Image (cartoon, rainbow, N blue to C red):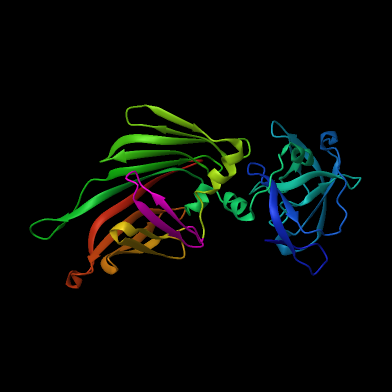
């Protein structure tokens, strides 16, 4: 990760992330010494509606764009500064200056569909952030919500996944069984996964709920058993960034053990898809292939180094582009004459915010 100083053909290496806030889309970078003077701090609390403001950014890659506007509202309780100075993609993170050229805010967002409805976080908010030193890769993973990590599209509130087994009648007719729910995931409006409901043979079998702190990091993980017993695990502030980021893995591999202390190996590609999953002790390995939309299109099962099964998948998309039905085909590699045969149909039922 590098930073390019304005007007210079130079790239400065980012050494670490000093602090960040996911809710306000902010971070402070530690970079090599630029030798440049900083912008003097202003007093955002002194701003009033109608005051002139100025923004600097790189909208659409147009470096060093300077815009003028004014404060159109001061939004409570988040203390956001609403401005009409144009902010386009590429301007987020740029300074918002008052008439004295002092820093009063950081451009953070625009209201899609609105005309010049743009927002800045008061620069004084940076003073409340605790300085640490985080690896760039960790904070990069945190920038992707769980919704995005799962490649879901649109304002997803929740989805429930179910499966129906396919059999054949004595006459050879395909018979699709009833849908049996397996899992339901619930998201908040920031795309954070806040609840996972589990099913066993279609019957509710407990859940996991997650809460997040004011910076958007996992704060508690609560496991609710089928009998209603609760186990709450509070995450220490110093561990929250790592715990939140660890669920997002790119171009990575790691080992885990199950409840029987059996080792399992998992490998991820650059888009966070699980491309390999195996159990070395059993000489078993699953290798998956994904399309450009990160949908699994093929899964190959190996045993003792030999291909044993191949599964192929096809999809139907809903209005937002999320798949609502997955047809699963299975072929036994040691019986090639059988070809592919429909064995299971998986469906997802979506709920969206605003519907």
| Residue 59 image point, x, y percent | 73, 59
Left or right of 188 on screen, residue 18: right
Identify the image quadrant of residue 31: bottom right
Left or right of 196 on screen, residue 50: right
Identify the image quadrant of residue 71: top right
Residue extending furthest toward the bottom: 337
Q: Is residue 49 magenta?
A: no
- Residue at 52% x, 39% y: name it: 188
Q: Choose between 306 and 1: the one closer to the eye.
A: 306
| Residue 125 image point, x, y percent | 75, 38
Q: Is residue 123 above or below residue 33?
A: above
Q: Is residue 253 magenta?
A: yes
Q: Choose between 101 and 244: the one closer to the eye.
A: 244
| Residue 332 image point, x, y percent | 22, 66
Q: Choose between 117 and 212: the one closer to the eye.
A: 212
The total of numbered circles placed on residues is: 0
- Residue at 43% x, 54% y: name it: 255
Residue 216 seen by the camera: no
Residue 238 seen by the camera: yes
Q: Choose between 48 and 231: the one closer to the eye.
A: 231
Q: Is residue 116 above or below residue 8?
A: above
Residue extending furthest toward the right: 100
| Residue 297 image point, x, y percent | 37, 64
Residue segment shown in magenta: 251-272
Residue extending furthest toward the left: 170
Q: Is residue 136 above or below residue 312?
A: above
Quarter of the image with the N terminus in it: bottom right
């Amino acid at each position: 990760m590098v930073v390019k100083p304005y007007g210079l053909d130079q790239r400065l290496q980012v050494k670490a992330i000093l602090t960040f806030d996911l809710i306000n889309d902010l971070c402070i970078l530690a970079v090599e010494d630029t030798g440049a003077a900083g912008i003097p701090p202003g007093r955002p609390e002194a701003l009033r509606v109608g005051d002139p403001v100025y923004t600097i950014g790189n909208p659409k890659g147009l470096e060093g764009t300077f815009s003028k506007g004014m404060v159109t509202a001061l939004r409570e309780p988040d203390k956001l500064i609403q401005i009409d100075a144009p902010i386009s993609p590429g301007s987020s993170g740029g300074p918002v200056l008052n008439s004295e050229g002092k820093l009063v805010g950081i451009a953070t967002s625009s209201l899609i569909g609105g005309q010049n409805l743009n927002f800045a976080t008061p620069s004084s908010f940076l003073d409340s952030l605790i300085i640490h030193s985080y690896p760039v890769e960790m904070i990069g993973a945190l920038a992707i919500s769980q919704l995005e990590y799962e490649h879901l599209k649109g304002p997803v509130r929740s989805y429930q996944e179910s499966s129906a087994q396919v059999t054949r009648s004595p006459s050879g007719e395909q018979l699709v069984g009833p849908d049996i729910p397996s899992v339901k995931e619930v998201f908040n409006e920031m795309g954070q996964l806040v609840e996972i409901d589990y099913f066993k043979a279609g019957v509710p079998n407990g859940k996991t709920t997650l809460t997040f702190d004011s910076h958007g990091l996992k704060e508690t993980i609560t496991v609710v058993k089928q009998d209603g017993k609760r186990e709450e695990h509070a995450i220490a502030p110093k561990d929250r960034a790592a715990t939140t980021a660890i669920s997002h893995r790119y171009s990575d591999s790691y080992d885990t053990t199950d409840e029987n202390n059996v080792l399992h190996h998992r490998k991820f590609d650059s888009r966070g898809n699980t491309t390999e999953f195996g159990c070395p002790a059993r000489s078993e390995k699953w290798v998956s292939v994904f399309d450009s939309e990160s949908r699994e299109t093929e899964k190959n099962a190996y045993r003792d180094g030999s291909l044993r099964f191949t599964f192929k998948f096809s999809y139907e998309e809903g209005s937002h582009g999320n798949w609502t039905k997955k047809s699963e085909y299975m072929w036994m590699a040691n019986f090639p004459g059988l070809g592919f045969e429909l064995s299971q149909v998986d469906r997802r039922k979506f709920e969206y915010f605003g519907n």
